[in-house]
Amino acid sequence: MAKYTGEQLRKMDAASLWHPYTKHSSMTEASFPIIERGEGLYLYDIEGNRFLDGISSWWCCNLGHSHPELVDSIKRQAAVLQHSILGNLTHPYAIELAARLVNLFPTSDRRVLFAGDGASAVEAALKVAVQYWYAVGKPERSKFVSLVNDYHGDTLGAVSVGFVESFHKQFAGVVSPSFQAESPCCKACGWGKTEETCNLECFASMQSIFNAHAEELAAVIVEPLCQGASGMRIYTSKYLAALGNLCREHDVLLISDEIAMGYGRTGKMFAFEHAGIDPDIVCCGKGMSGGYLPISATVVKKRVYDAFTDYPEDNTFYHGHTFAGNPIASAVGVTVLDIYERESIVAQAQEKGAVLAREMARFAALDCVDNVRCLGMIAAVELHEQSLQPNYAGRTHPEAIKRELLANSILVRPLGRVVYIMPPLIIPENLLCETVRCLYDAIKKTAENQ
């Protein structure tokens, strides 16, 4: 139980806490839950109110909250070894987790570099790519390609390849921007194509960059199949397959940023599997610990790793983080994989994803909706552009939908005019359908009340 009252906590919050990705006004003009504990699919505030975690606590609590096996794993390891660095040392759970991770890939000839969060995994991937080409005698290959609207984290290297104007415009002068290819989004196709008429017109921009700059490219980095932070912009696996072929043809490294999309969210363990490709570098995070502790990983093919030898010249990768591969986080990471394997979590996600897509189909008929898009256990409703105007007649505002869902004990967090749900992968099918129904009713109600 909290040692302070709700009023005391709110005053302390207002006086001391800086909330990430949060407008100051949103914390002063409206009430908000103070979450005290989690259990299963739900979060509970200090007043005892229960909320369905509709976004898996920023897309990472795939197995829900207070999972007894994960909690026990943390307790057991915390009683034995709390921290030990991986610089010139090792420990059992870092070894086991790395071995288990590489065996999830098409081939196991990989090495795993641990970090504590997604952006750090991306930073490592970018530096690995640049230093690799330097080590093999091609230092001119130091440029990156990314997609417009991609988001890869908020450290400066990650911003350089995931520059989102609304997030990062203030930092334009201190990052080295990547080449940016036009981003695909199949339900809002800029070429007016359908699945039946698509000839990957959206890929021409990427092809053009390669035609002009292939000899100076170190790597391409993408959010595979879904650009999360820019509004769950979902695109076809055909695009990813074409990109894999293009990178292989020009010997350009391919980095798949699976921080959000990995660990079963798309109905495969990793999103790149939908395209049948084999990226050179894969970034993992979020779901690695079930969302319980900070841990991430940069998984690198052996042929890249081998260039970092210190003989006859020193090409050691002088990079790392204090808590990289922390023993407690590594232990819970191993337990997560145990649960995934035993309970067929990824197969469950695929099956429930089909149910989610079926249930979401009727949203397209709502007058206030531009399009509906689904991928695995992700469902997004994009409202008309006018929906961001609070008093636009006949339309609804995403924040109004958020408030309506909160009143019905469901936590969501819209992205601009996109309202989405990404519940824990363990959600029962009947509750998944009920959540979709609540979202539908919330959109209809707020639209009718404008």
Image: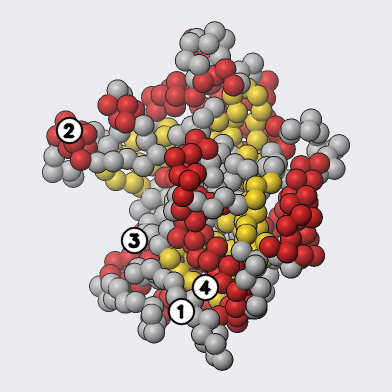
Q: Residue at left 53%, top 11%?
A: 392
Residue named by callout 2: 11
- Image quarter for residue 211? bottom right
Query: Who comes first in sequence, dot 1 or dot 4?
Result: 1
Mark closer to the observer (3, 4): 4
Q: Amino acid at mark 2?
A: Lys
Distance of label 4 from label 2 (alpha carbons): 43 Å
- Image quarter for residue 413? top left
Q: Amino acid at mark 3?
A: Val
Secondary structure beneath dot 1 equals helix
Residue 340 visible in the displayed image: no
Secondary structure beneath dot 3 equals helix
Q: Amino acid at mark 4?
A: Val
Distance of label 3 from label 1 (alpha carbons): 21 Å
Compared across the picture, whether 268 is left or right of 26 comes to right
Residue named by callout 4: 112
Query: Who comes first in sequence, dot 4 or dot 2?
Result: 2
Distance of label 2 from label 1 (alpha carbons): 45 Å
Distance of label 1 from label 4 (alpha carbons): 9 Å
Distance of label 3 from label 2 (alpha carbons): 31 Å
Task: Sort mark 2 into few (<14), some (14-19) or many (20+) by Cα contacts within 10 Å.
Answer: few
Query: Who comes first in sequence, dot 3 or dot 2?
Result: 2
Task: Sort mark 3 into few (<14), some (14-19) or many (20+) by Cα contacts within 10 Å.
Answer: some
Q: Nearer the viewer, residue 134 or 298?
A: 134
